[in-house]
Amino acid sequence: MNEITLKLTLEEVNLILNALGDQPFAQVHQLVAKVQTQGSDQLRHEEVKPTPEVEESD
């Protein structure tokens, strides 16, 4: 299966998930789960990313 990578804002992803929510569950539940899993993994990764320290000058 070919895969693609998309760059979307959190707002855009939520809009897509809301639209999928209007579809029959049996047709979209695996896709919704996949989007949620990948999104939460990425958000969790962003939260633990260390922030660069700024050197103070006198």
Image (spheres, rainbow, N blue to C red):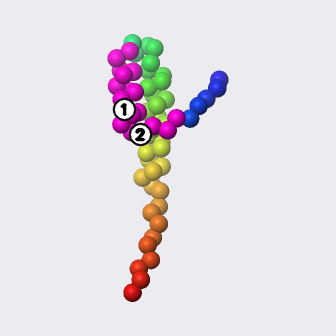
Which residue lies under the disc numbered 2? 9
Q: Is residue 26 left or right of residue 22?
A: right
The quarter of the displayed image where residue 15 is located: top left
Which residue lies under the disc numbered 1? 14
Per the image, label 2 sits on a secondary structure element best described as loop
Q: Is residue 45 left or right of residue 5?
A: left
Quick check: is 19 in the magenta stretch? yes
The quarter of the displayed image where residue 33 is located: top left
In this rendering, the count of numbered labels is: 2
Per the image, label 1 sits on a secondary structure element best described as helix
Residue type of the residue flagged with mark 1: Asn
Which residue is painted at 47% across and 66% down in the image? 52
Front residue of this view, candidates 26 and 56:
56
Work out how far the residue at label 1 is from the one at label 2, CA to CA, in angstroms.
Answer: 9 Å
Which residue is painted at 48% across and 24% down in the image? 31
Instruction: Tell me where residue 22 appears, x and y as whole percent.
Output: 34, 17
Crowd tier of the residue under label 2, counting other residues whose Cα lies within 10 Å: few below 14, some 14–19, many 20 or above: few
Magenta segment, prevailing SS (helix, strand or loop): helix
Quarter of the image where the N terminus is located: top right
The quarter of the displayed image where residue 11 is located: top left
Instruction: Tell me where residue 58 appears, x and y as whole percent.
Output: 39, 87
Point out the stretch of residues depicted in magenta.
6-23
Q: Is residue 43 above or below residue 15?
A: below
Front residue of this view, candidates 58 and 29:
58
Asked if the residue at tag 2 contacts the one at tag 1, i.e. Cβ–Cβ closer than 8 Å, the answer is no
Instruction: Tell me where residue 37 appears, x and y as whole percent.
Output: 47, 35
